[in-house]
Amino acid sequence: MRTVTVVGASLSGVYAARELRAQGFDGRLVIVGEEPHHPYDRPPLSKDFLTGKADEEQLALTDSEEVAELDAEWLLGVRARGLDARGRTVLLGDGRTVSTDGVVIATGASARRLPGDALTGVHTLRTLDDARALRDELSDGPRRVVVIGGGFIGAETASSCTALGHDVTVVEAAPLPLVPQLGPEMAAVCATLHRRGGAALVTGTGVARLHAGAGAGGVTGATRVTGVGGVTGVELSDGRLLPADTVIVGIGATPNTGWLAGSTLGLHDGVLCDDGCATGLPQVVAVGDVARVGGRRVEHWTSATEQPRVAVRNLLAGRTVEPVRSVPYFWSDQYGARIQFAGRRNDGDTVRVTEGALAEGGFLAVYERDGRATAVLSVDRPRPFMRARRALMRTASEAEPAVP
Amino acid sequence: MITVCRLEDLPMGESVRIDTTPPIAVFNADGELYAVDDTCTHQDASLSEGWLEGCLVECPLHAASFDLRTGKPTCLPARRPVRTHRVSVEDGVVHVHLTIEEGTAA
């Protein structure tokens, strides 16, 4: 392989580029990134970046020394708009093409939007530009903030907004947030964090529509449609109207596969891959949020850092010689609490607290099925969590071929 | 010099966090004592709560690993070292001798 093109310059793309060099690829390395920024880490955007504790420099995923070592051609601020049928040519949005022998697809996911969310004062939080716009708006004095979606991004953003002194309401369509991730018992426990942190939580009702005012929104730094007037409220499906100066939409993300529509790759909620990140074309692999690996697509930071090593190995080998074996792991910091979760919980698993207590001060809970641990959750118990996570990893590596 | 604890209160494989500014973590790695800045250089997490193996400690949040002898990261996502501090034991009491921050007048 003389040229490898990594499409996507965020976490999994950067890790893939590193792996290519670490595994001995010394040919031409092209990295295409839609955003104009150098690679940055997204998790702090909803937390320390929003509250002003971390600046942009601290988000950087690479430094000048590493950039020099990678010896790559960085095409930033340009999006890929196509991949030819053989996977040998990447078409760029500005009309250029990149001829390549191998491709790593790492185009990630985009924040899901709400109809009518182009109003001033309505935000999503996925990119640095999103976070900059929201941070600017939140620095303008106390505001009434409505966060739509009680998932991790919603909860973390709400937590940051309360820390900044804003009046925050979280709206969740399900009866309880995070049930798919944590199960009903533990989801109920985590829901109490909102109230403990001073945010109101409204559950079991969706959003009917956003209300807009007549004048300009008085918003700085936002790149929204102007002349329409800013958002003034969120009307819920049960008829209630929540007044709002700022609305943050945190209702999940969709994988960025649109640019692959004309390719021969299988697409279904992500780029379809085998359990080694290989697509239907032998010289094309996919990693991170955009990849559906062995039937599962996960949007976890840790997966995006773990998959590239295996994907690159298989890419350079020209076939899948190694599957991804990992135990899913994610964390969330909200309202001063650190939530950590590892493993695969399934409906019907039992859960019991093995350390600490639900009421206060943190705990460790283990999910079990047929007497075996399937997952582990911790709130402010990092040490026992680490032990439990390692035990899960040991069990997984002893078991039959793991799914990613 | 900071007094940490009695040596018997820091058995092998254990660690203790001192609430200095910035906080410091002291480890007993198989009988050798090490002290480093407690906060991971990648993102906010306490290394004293990390996984100790030999003289390496793994961060409990994102699994960055540091060599306690040098403070250098041994793997991503950390790219910058943690400061190391000298540890001594006198009359069964563990002390940490702070390394003055580079570039500050001491």
Image (spheres, coloured by chain):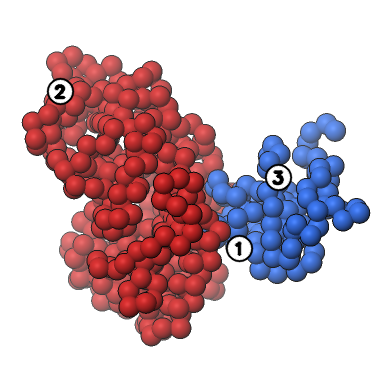
Residue at mark 1 to residue at mark 2: CA–CA distance: 52 Å
Residue B61, percent from left and from top: 52, 55
Mark 2 = which residue? A212
Dividing the picture into quadrants, the one containing residue A114 is top left
Chain of residue at mark 2:
A
Q: According to the rendering, which colour does chain B have?
A: blue
Question: Residue A130's x, y, as percent?
Answer: 34, 37
Q: Is there CB contact under 8 Å for labels 1 and 2?
A: no
- Three-letter amino acid code at the position of disc 2: Ala
Please name the residue that numbered disc 3 is placed on. Answer: B18
Residue situated in front as seen by the camera: A146 or A296: A146
Rendered colour, chain A = red
Q: How crowded is mark 3: few (under 14 residues within 10 Å), some or many (20 or more)?
A: some
Q: Mark 1 points at which residue?
A: B51
Give the label, 1 or 3, closer to the camera: 3
Q: Where is residue B13 in the image (x, y as percent from the top left)?
A: 69, 65
